[in-house]
Amino acid sequence: MNDSTLLRTPLYDLHVEAGGKMVPFAGYEMPVQYPLGIMKEHLHTREKAGLFDVSHMGQAYIRSKDGSDPAAIIEHLMPSALAVLKPGKMRYTVLLNDRGGIEDDLMVTRTFEPEGTLYVVVNAACKDKDYDWLEEKLGDRITLEPLEDRALLALQGPKAEEVLSAMAANVADLNFMEATMVTLEGVVCWVSRSGYTGEDGYEISVPSDEAEAFARRLLAHDDVEWIGLGARDSLRLEAGLCLSGHDFNSEVSPVAANITFALGKKRKEAGDFVGADRILSELADGPDMIRVGILPSGRAPAREGTDIADSTGAIIGKITSGGFGPTFGGPVAMGFVPKDFADEGTKLHLMIRGKAHEAVVASTPFVPQRYKRKQP
């Protein structure tokens, strides 16, 4: 793909105006950083509120063709408990292939209206593939409607609630993984309390023709700064969150990816989803390889593709995500190791620039997640 075929989000001109360094990403021209720089953008999000353009993500409605619950239908391809979702509730899940591998991860939300509709958000690099897979497997039972006329913004950080609730007070009432339709200064938006940084915050689906003016209103707040892809990656890595196509792919199961929280209890008991035999077997016996958190010693970060070795020097796995954690204050990484090496505290060696560096298996997240959850 060359520059002439790259797509642009409705906020492209605003990024350029703000000094964003534009790079190819998932078929789009996207800002990797702004003049503030990746380190300061990262820290600003942790301390105040960062604004992310995630309009390249896929947004779509899913409905059933016969008027039945579409959640009960798509559960065939997703192992989470979706049919139990009430309006305004959302769930993280994965789209499975017949081998129990992960085609993509996504968010599924039951809308208030139109009745009998699900709102899904899928990863940018996978959206066409995801839509094709859903159509191939379930197209005779569901209707999938991509929302091409909507932008998507993420406002993340400890000041996000204060900023957004000044526009509409009721967004403060949302808890993590809840959503609602709300009018923000005259613009009707679908707002969820969710995100990809480990911080409290919101994702806001806004009509494309209103996106620039809406973003400008958010950026006018002293606590809000544009944040690019570079800081988005370091933020999600510190939070221990997977990146589709890197920390898992179509050959990796949810068990091997260590995201078994996406498997509903009753769904596991029923085993009524594609790839269930493999997934249930791995739940019982453990996968051959499993994703773990890894803390390298010293200051040298271990990037994606770095070999992981045991104490004898034998290569046993690879780093799938790695870099410097600005809030953590040192390098952090995730990768796949054999299950016998997966216990916290297990010593490893990382082959960085031809030299073995000591590392240790660690729990994730590397910095505390600060989602707003309902108090018991």
Image (cartoon, rainbow, N blue to C red):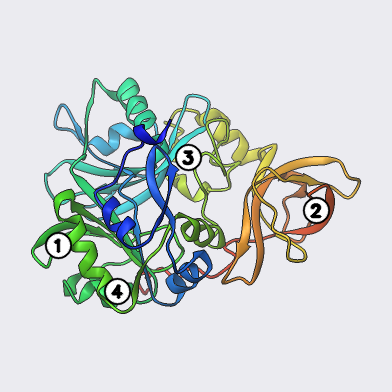
In the rendering, at what x and y percent does residue 296 appear? 74, 60
Residue 323 lies left or right of residue 317; in this view the side is left
| Residue shown at 69% from the left, 40% from the top | 289
Quadrant in the picture for residue 133 = top left
Residue 161: which disc?
Answer: 4
Residue 348: which disc?
Answer: 2
In the rendering, at what x and y percent does residue 46 appear? 46, 72
Q: Secondary structure at mark 3?
A: helix
Q: Is residue 79 visible?
A: no
Residue 148: which disc?
Answer: none
Q: Secondary structure at mark 4?
A: helix
Q: Are marks 2 and 3 in contact (CB under 8 Å)?
A: no
Q: Secondary structure at mark 1?
A: strand
Name the amino acid type tagged 4: Glu
Residue position marked by numbered label 3 in the rendering? 268
In the rendering, at what x and y percent does residue 199 appear? 43, 68
Name the amino acid type tagged 2: Leu
Mark 4 or mark 3: which comes first in sequence? 4
Mark 4 or mark 1: which comes first in sequence? 4
**Foreground of the two, 132 or 41:** 41
Name the amino acid type tagged 3: Lys
Marks 4/3: CA–CA distance: 36 Å
- Estimate how packed mark 4 is, as few (under 14), some (14 to 19) or many (20 or more) residues with alpha carbons within 10 Å: many
Residue position marked by numbered label 1 in the rendering? 182
